[in-house]
Image (cartoon, grey):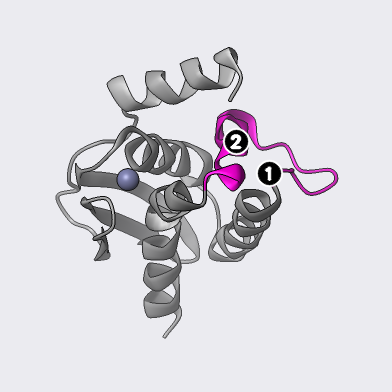
Amino acid sequence: MSDIYGEILLDHYRLPRNKGRLEHPTLSVEGVNPLCGDELTLDLEFDGQRLKDIRFSGKGCAISVASASMLTEALKGKTVEEIERWIGVFREFIRTGRAPDGVELGDLLALEGISKLPVRVKCATLPWSALEEAISRYRG
Ligand code: ZN
């Protein structure tokens, strides 16, 4: 992992964005990664088809916390359809280490080295799997 990406990761770990609980979440989902001991909860507040607010709480390693922090920053304000697209993009990115053509990943690019560290893939995808569950419940 290059230094600059390491720094972005550490920044999100030390100063997580959107950390805490929402007072009136539309729904909350939990994710656990027993391999590493990561536990996190996502609170989501929807306004119709738009994700009005999102926060995460819990404890985990630097990669799971940074991934959750980046997720909330990237997806707050997005629509359900946009979020579903992002989940697909993220899964492809974390598997291949490359952003799909024409997609600006922003800080999420800091996770590009994770594809080469199979034991850490679950840490990085934990918040995204929880998000996917949340979206399917919201749609359900
Ligand atoms: Zn972890």
Disc 2 marks a residue whose amino acid type is Gly
**Cα gap from disc 2 to disc 1, whole angstroms:** 6 Å
Q: In this view, does 118 lie to the left or right of 101?
A: left
Front residue of 46/64: it is 64
Viewport quadrant of the C terminus = bottom left
Front residue of 77/107: it is 107
Could you say whether the residue bearing mark 2 is in a helix, strand or loop?
helix
Front residue of 24/118: it is 118
* Residue 45, percent from left and from top: 32, 57
Q: Do the residues labelled 2 and 1 touch (CB within 8 Å)?
A: yes
Disc 1 marks a residue whose amino acid type is Gly
Q: Which stretch did the figure color magenta? A: 97-117
Q: Which residue is drawn at 14% across and 50% down?
A: 23
Q: Is residue 84 above or below residue 5?
A: below
Mark 1 or mark 2, which is nearer the start of the sequence?
A: 1
Which image quadrant for residue 3? top right
Identity of the residue furthest to the bottom in this view:
140
Q: Which residue was labeled with disc 2?
A: 113
Q: Is residue 107 magenta?
A: yes
